Amino acid sequence: MRSTVTPAPLGRPDGADDSARRRWDVLLAALQAVAIPGTRLKREERLAAKTTMRVGGAARIYAEPAQVLELQALLRGARSHGIDVFILGRGSNVIVPDEGVDGLVVSLAHEHWSGFEPRSDGRVWVGAGLRLKNLCGLAAGAGLVGFEFLEGIPGSVGGALRMNAGAMGGWMFDVVDEVKMMSFDGEVRTRARVEMQVDYRHCGDLHQAIALGALLRPASQADADAIGRQIDVYRRKRHESQPREPSAGCIFKNPPGGSAGRLIDECGLKGERVGDAEVSPVHANFIVNRGRATAADVLELVRRVRTRVRETKGVDLQPEVLLYGKNWEDVL
């Protein structure tokens, strides 16, 4: 049985000339040759619908492996052919450029990566592809306290580990005991939390590795209904303080001792627009998509906000979201 492969439609624009297009077709065939049956491989897969911002172009090659061996084969094949690899979770903290991503985009969307396995010692193993919302609900059902703050974060476990996601005063690595990861060479290892490089919105160990899952430690146990009530409190707070339109979450990191949203608001930038990209009137550190925004609109608005805050407040805001497949330094 061969891997599932979908060729690019004839005449479909992908931002590359015919020579480049043929090169990526050849690279796809090379990955197909080493892929284990069950791997889903596609050319020119549109990524906008796979992100919460709903902007951006296509991945030159897109893959959804269904098990560890498939992921290893893909990574080793990409390495041997000089193909850059990018990991896509639920797309909640990324902006995909309009021209797309020149590389292999790997998504752990297969159900294999969404496990939730309580252990006899009270801890729980979770797969990197598990939605944070589902993790929160499953933990509540099992009477496990400590994961409630994750409920409203529209991401996956893997993305939360990569960014040390936080909300409501809690951080992902507050509940982590160990992480299982795979290097881009295909080597699997497990690291204890105390061994890992973790700080604000960042996990250095996952820059050149992919999180496969994590062993989490709950704070305590309680009645599921009591946990559910706390989740409801957090949910209402989010609904009252954050926009409902498509966004990538908070655009900028908070400066030391300050608030990016407050600085942007004080500069009078709520409602500022470029095309259909808008600084949210609800929360100034969110840029929302009013319907037809492009990545170029979003990037121009990011530049405009940074310039105004720097000129008015003397603070150089740094992006928190990832510019997928590129470096912020190249566009700011």
Image: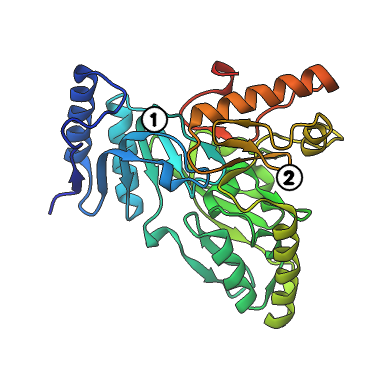
Compared across the picture, whether 85 is left or right of 80 comes to: right
Mark 2: few, some, or many residues within 10 Å (few <14, many ≥20)?
Answer: many
Q: What residue type is labelled 2?
A: His
- The residue at 80%/36% (across/down) is 265
Q: Depth check: 190 or 231 in front? A: 231
SS type, badge 2 = loop
SS type, badge 1 = strand
Q: Say if residue 278 shows up in the picture.
A: yes
Q: Depth check: 48 or 42 in front? A: 48
Q: In which quarter of the image is the N terminus?
A: bottom left
Q: Which amino acid does label 1 sit on?
A: Val
- Tell me the tag on residue 283: 2
Q: Depth check: 241 or 28 in front? A: 241
Q: How many marks?
A: 2
The percent position of residue 163, horizontal first and vertical second, equals 61, 42
Residue located farthest toward the left when viewing the structure as drawn: 1
The percent position of residue 202, horizontal first and vertical second, equals 65, 38
The percent position of residue 311, horizontal first and vertical second, equals 80, 17
Compared across the picture, whether 87 is left or right of 234 comes to: left
Q: In which quarter of the image is the C terminus?
A: top right
Q: Earlier in the sequence, mark 1 or mark 2?
A: 1
